[in-house]
Amino acid sequence: MLKIRLQRQGKKKAPFYHIVVADSRSPRDGKIVEKIGSYDPMTNPATVVLSKEKVEQWIKNGAKPTDTVKALIENAK
C-alpha cells in the first residue's frame, strides 16, 4: 500500500521535510517511489512546495496521504 508522507531531512533541531510517495512498510527515511514536494517548517510562515498534478495523480492511483500531509495539501490550495 502506497502512502504520501513526510521524509525528514536537515540537521538536529532544524528539520526540513520532503513530501514523498513510499510503500507503507518502508521506514520513514527509507526507499521512496517519487518525491512530489517539500515542506520547511523553520520559515515564517512555513514553506510548502507541491506538484499538484503529481499529488492528484498518486491519489487517483490509490496512494493515501497521512494526516499531516493531508493538512499540508489543503493549506497549499
Image (spheres, rainbow, N blue to C red):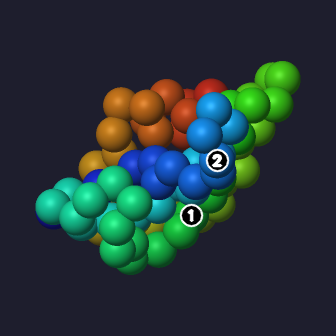
Real-space Cα distance between discs 2 and 1?
A: 21 Å
Measured along the vertical axis of the image, is residue 30 above or below residue 12? Answer: below
The label nearer to you, 2 versus 1, is 2
Relative placement, left or right, of 61 versus 46 is left
Relative placement, left or right, of 3 versus 6 is left
From the image, which quarter does the C terminus lie in?
Answer: top right
Relative placement, left or right, of 51 versus 57 is right
Q: Whole-percent x and y of residue 21?
A: 39, 64
Residue at 84% from the left image edge and 23% from the top image edge: 44
The local crowd at label 2, few if under 14, some if 14 to 19, many if 20 or more residues have their Cα within 10 Å, is few
Residue at 36% from the left image edge and 31% from the top image edge: 67
Q: Quadrant of residue 62?
A: bottom left
Measured along the vertical axis of the image, is residue 38 above or below residue 15? Answer: below
The local crowd at label 1, few if under 14, some if 14 to 19, many if 20 or more residues have their Cα within 10 Å, is some
Disc 1 element: strand
Q: What residue is pinned by disc 1?
A: 36
For the view shown, which residue lies furthest in the top direction? 44
Relative placement, left or right, of 27 versus 9 is left
Disc 2 element: strand
**Residue flagged by tag 2: what amino acid is it?**
Lys
Q: Earlier in the sequence, mark 2 or mark 1?
A: 2
Q: Nearer the viewer, residue 46 or 11?
A: 11
Q: What residue is pinned by disc 2?
A: 11
From the image, which quarter does the N terminus lie in?
Answer: bottom left
Q: Whole-percent x and y of residue 61?
A: 30, 67
Q: Nearer the viewer, residue 56 or 47?
A: 47
**Residue flagged by tag 1: what amino acid is it?**
Ile
Q: Nearer the viewer, residue 35 or 59?
A: 35
Q: Quadrant of residue 59?
A: bottom left
